[in-house]
Amino acid sequence: MSHFLQFLGPNEEPLLLHPLVLSILAFILILLFKWSSTLPNNNKNPPPSPPKLPIIGNLHQIGLHPHHSLQDLAQLYGPLMLLQFGKVPTLVVSSADAAQEIMKTHDVVFANRPKTRIFKKLSYNFEDVAMAPYGEYWRQMKSILVLHLLSNKKVQSFRAVREEELSLLIEKIRQSCSSSAVNLSEAFAEFTMDIICRVALGRKYGEGEGESGRNFKELLGEVMELLGVINVGDYMPWLAWVSRVNGLDAKAEKVAKQLDDFLEGVIEEHINGQKKGNDNHDLENEDQKDFVDVLLWVQKENVIGFSIERDVFTAGTDTTYSVLEWVMTELLRHPKTMKKMQNEVREIARNKKDIREVDLDEMHYLTAVIKETLRLHPILPLFNSSRIM
């Protein structure tokens, strides 16, 4: 060990004192100082922050389950803490009061979304309603959603679709459970996709709809997988080349094109159907029009917006059946709760052939179970939602 820091012999100068080594160390220190000085530090009273390392910041403190790691850090540093992920300063909010301040009181300040390479490729260069920057374009896109697609009148107009698909799901489970186990995850996923496809596209594109249905289901799975990928180049721009080498960029471009081609086919199908039926798009008198019909009318009226369709699927499929899975899981874990909820449902459904959506307003305990499930198992346990304007 006595010769570890020396060159070839005992008479040589120690390695750490060699002029070349000292020059390199000095150069590295200058670079690190310059890098740290570029980080935003305008706030004279920033939120508490755990110690960070040069270059990577606090990335080393995020384990395989980021939401668990952040919860542990929040217990030490409070509900508002500032982390540094590479070159990206990140404000972590982990309490209801703090979240209300950010998402409601100061929502305009935090209205923009982080711009990542994957989102750019999957959102028409940040032009869909979920990723568009806050401004006039975003306000118009949101207005289309609120007025034409997600209004209470429009949602209620598809009640028959939801009730029909629910009846099919119950019948499928009833027929299968007598002879074999039922994979509820797959059943819920198909149930959710069938409803969304009928509402948004006008017909089903699920497993039972042939090759196009299988391809569409696989395509949505790839979209959700890409949205969950952490791209190191988003946090360390000098490593942006990694996503080109490992094929992530190519995969995102391929999936975006496949989804585009699928939706183009759906649009052509609707346009051809309208021509044959001499459809005049009188939306005021036709509540049963699907989302594509509505958006075609919007486009015809020279109002911006057709990239909304992607948001409908990515935001509606995985999130909905995930809630159903967790509700069933928690009920199996808590038999007393399941029994109490069953009693409520049976009491309200007494002397009725079927349960309708209107009956849900009377099922207060069921509503409480769903809300508690959402509290325990948020759909997105880690939500990178906002970017300061």
Image: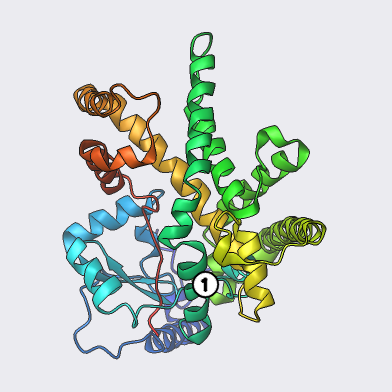
Would residue 153 appear left or right of 214 to someone viewing this image?
left
- Residue closer to the observer: 33 or 352: 352
Residue 271, percent across and down?
Answer: 77, 62
Q: Is residue 318 above or below residue 305?
A: above
Q: In the rendered image, which residue does mark 1 sit on?
A: 144
Quadrant of image for the C terminus: bottom left
Would residue 31 appear left or right of 269 to someone viewing this image?
left
Residue 34 appears in which quarter of the rendering? bottom left
Residue 244, percent across and down?
Answer: 69, 65
Quadrant of image for the N terminus: bottom left
Q: Residue furthest top?
A: 179
- Residue closer to the observer: 351 or 335: 351
Residue 311, percent across and down?
Answer: 55, 61
Q: Is residue 56 above or below residue 13?
A: above
Q: Please tell me how crowded label 1 is: few (under 14), some (14-19), or many (20+) other residues with Cα within 10 Å.
A: many
Q: Residue at x 46, y 78 (%)?
A: 13
Q: Residue furthest front?
A: 285
Q: Residue at x 67, y 43 (%)?
A: 205
Work out whether residue 230 can be spotted. yes
Residue 240 appears in which quarter of the rendering? bottom right
Q: Residue at x 43, y 78 (%)?
A: 112
Q: Is residue 165 above or below residue 75?
A: above
* Colour pattern of the rendering: rainbow
Tag 1 secondary structure: helix
Would residue 292 appear left or right of 185 to someone viewing this image?
right
Callout 1 amino acid: Ile
Residue 357 appears in which quarter of the rendering? top left
Work out whether residue 78 can be spotted. no
Q: Is residue 92 above or below residue 173?
A: below
Residue 282, percent across and down?
Answer: 63, 67
- Residue closer to the observer: 177 or 153: 153
